[in-house]
Amino acid sequence: MYIESLELKNFRNYEDLSIVLDPGTNILYGDNAQGKTNVLEAIYLCGTTKSHRGSKDKEMIRFDQDESHIRMMVKKDGVSHKIDMHLKKNKAKGIAIDGIPIRKAAELFGIVNLVAFSPEDLNIIKNGPSERRRFMDLELCQLNKVYLQELTSYNKVLNQRNKLLKDIGFQPGLTETLDVWDMQLVSYGKKIISLRKRFMEELGEIIRQIHSNLTGQKEEIRLLYEPDVEEEVFEEKLQSAREKDLRFRVTSVGPHRDDFCVQTNGIDIRKYGSQGQQRTAALSLKMSEIYLVEKVTKDHPVLLLDDVLSELDNNRQNYLLQSIHNIQTVITCTGLDELIENNFSIDRVFRVTEGKIDF
């Protein structure tokens, strides 16, 4: 599976763009703030419905325009598929696969799997729990349609419950309706906890060898899922927290507060690891994503490397580049010197200048 081409209209700083990608390694190079990352964002968005930068739809539409269009051609098992996506300022995005509109985002998943890696991901270990939850959600939503549906439903119920908690402050009689939302929250939440637990176990098995190789067999890494509440006691804990929730007007128990711990040689590196240890662990995490996608889908993902190479030392650069020679990769960078010096195989080069791309 690989991406054949990408067309953009009024997306970010691109008025009109059409590029054909090589199934191997593609390089987008140019000065900062020229639009390299925007191309990767469009690819990720078109394949997952979400921005890897966490941007909202209206933020990605070109200035002074009301809508944006992305078209991506993907070849899978020898058959080409067309993904069309329309972004609109004040409406939900529209998505069509091979000309047929889809109603649920889950229908898109499975056509193309993407792993995006940016400099911000190197801070996933030392940043707060929300970053690590986002890491779990982005990958799980691609790999498991059931998870996507359960997470979407859970978040809707969570928002409704939080709104109700605020409304009860003005209308105490609404308290009796909390039971309805609690029942749904527990139902969706239990499934999320179970699927996250299995995901972290699978990822933990894969990451051990990768991290050992990256550290020259000096460090042993472990991933420990830390659910805010265990699934079998979720209902009980939610009931116990009701008085607190009513006082603070927010839901205090559930998988929306989950985290996971990263240990190397038994030490929690979120708190006690050096910056080098944290960055190496983050690299191991992202590389483990690639292998997990291959294991689950029996196919290679497309790898998007957004100016990451400049953030890594030579050893980590070399390990990363040597590990991705058999999958389609799109790399953004400010120059080609490091790639040339390392004799890295490059199949297609694009120069990006002020929202335009030269081949």
Image (cartoon, rainbow, N blue to C red):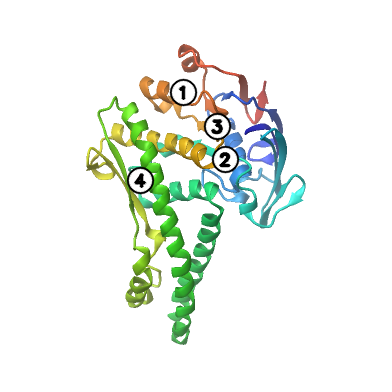
Q: Nearer the viewer, mark 1 or mark 4?
A: 1
What is the x, y in percent for residue 179? 45, 79
Vertical order, 164 against 82 (above or below):
below
- Residue underneath mark 1: 321
Amino acid type shown at disc 3: Ala
Q: Is residue 196 visible?
A: yes
Q: CA distance from mark 4 to mark 3?
A: 25 Å
Q: CA distance from mark 1 to mark 2?
A: 19 Å
Q: Earlier in the sequence, mark 4 or mark 3?
A: 3
Q: Earlier in the sequence, mark 1 or mark 2?
A: 2
Q: CA distance from mark 4 to mark 2?
A: 26 Å
- Residue underneath mark 3: 33
- Residue underneath mark 4: 127
Disc assigned to residue 113? 2
Q: Earlier in the sequence, mark 2 or mark 3?
A: 3
Q: Are marks 2 and 3 in contact (CB under 8 Å)?
A: no
Question: In the image, what residue occupies the spot 23% across and 37% down?
Answer: 265
Amino acid type shown at disc 2: Asn
Q: Earlier in the sequence, mark 4 or mark 2?
A: 2
Q: Nearer the viewer, mark 3 or mark 1?
A: 1
Q: Are marks 1 and 4 in contact (CB under 8 Å)?
A: no
Q: Earlier in the sequence, mark 3 or mark 1?
A: 3
- For the N terminus, the image quarter is top right
Secondary element at image label 1: helix
What is the x, y in percent for residue 20? 69, 27
Q: CA distance from mark 2 to mark 3?
A: 27 Å
